[in-house]
Amino acid sequence: MTPVSPRRPLVAASWMAAAAVAALIWSAVSPHSYAVLTHHPWWSGHSAWTLQVVATEGLMTVFFLAIGLELSREIAGGHRRHFGAPVLAALGGMAGAGLMAWGVGGIT
């Protein structure tokens, strides 16, 4: 098995950060067009899926799955002193999502 290049995750993280910054700028410059795109029902069926639903439910599920897998890998490998970062990432993901939802009025 070939080792994973440390550059690959850095490139992926850079693209994700650039996309997040672009979305923040777009939502600040033109909130109406951003809301139209994120609240438009893209998939039909018994429930309409919007980009907002996909991001909050789907991507958060994948995020916490990755955190859980990383924790299990660290614990199974005997590296218990290295599992602080995944735990902090999980707590930050939960707190960050909750604070953002509370800030925009999603939680009362």
Image (cartoon, helix red, strand yellow):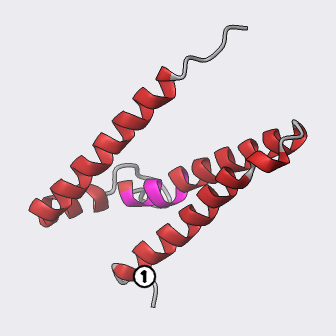
Q: Position of residue 16 (x, y in %)?
A: 38, 40
Q: Name the quadrant of the N terminus.
A: top right
Q: Is residue 19 left or right of residue 65?
A: left
Q: Check the image and report above or below for 27 versus 7.
A: below
Closer to the camera in the image, 41 or 68: 68
Q: Check the image and report above or below for 35 versus 80.
A: below
Closer to the camera in the image, 41 or 88: 88
Figure label count: 1
Q: Residue furthest front?
A: 81
- The answer to whether residue 30 of the structure is visible from this angle is no
- Residue at the image point whose x is 46% and y is 53% from the top: 54
The stretch of residues the image draws in magenta is 52-58
Q: Is residue 55 magenta?
A: yes
Crowding at dot 1, Cα within 10 Å, few <14 / some 14-19 / many 20+, comes out as: few
Q: Is residue 41 left or right of residue 70?
A: left
Q: Position of residue 20 (x, y in %)?
A: 32, 49
Residue on which disc 1 sits:
102
Q: Position of residue 79 (x, y in %)?
A: 83, 41
Q: Position of residue 57 (x, y in %)?
A: 53, 59
- Residue at the image point whose x is 29% and y is 58% from the top: 38
Q: Residue furthest top?
A: 2
- Residue at the image point whose x is 75% and y is 46% from the top: 82
Q: Name the quadrant of the C terminus.
A: bottom left
Which structural element holds mark 1?
A: helix
Magenta residues, dominant SS class: helix
- The answer to whether residue 79 of the structure is visible from this angle is yes
- Three-letter residue code for mark 1: Trp
Q: Residue furthest bottom?
A: 108
Q: Is residue 104 left or right of residue 62?
A: left
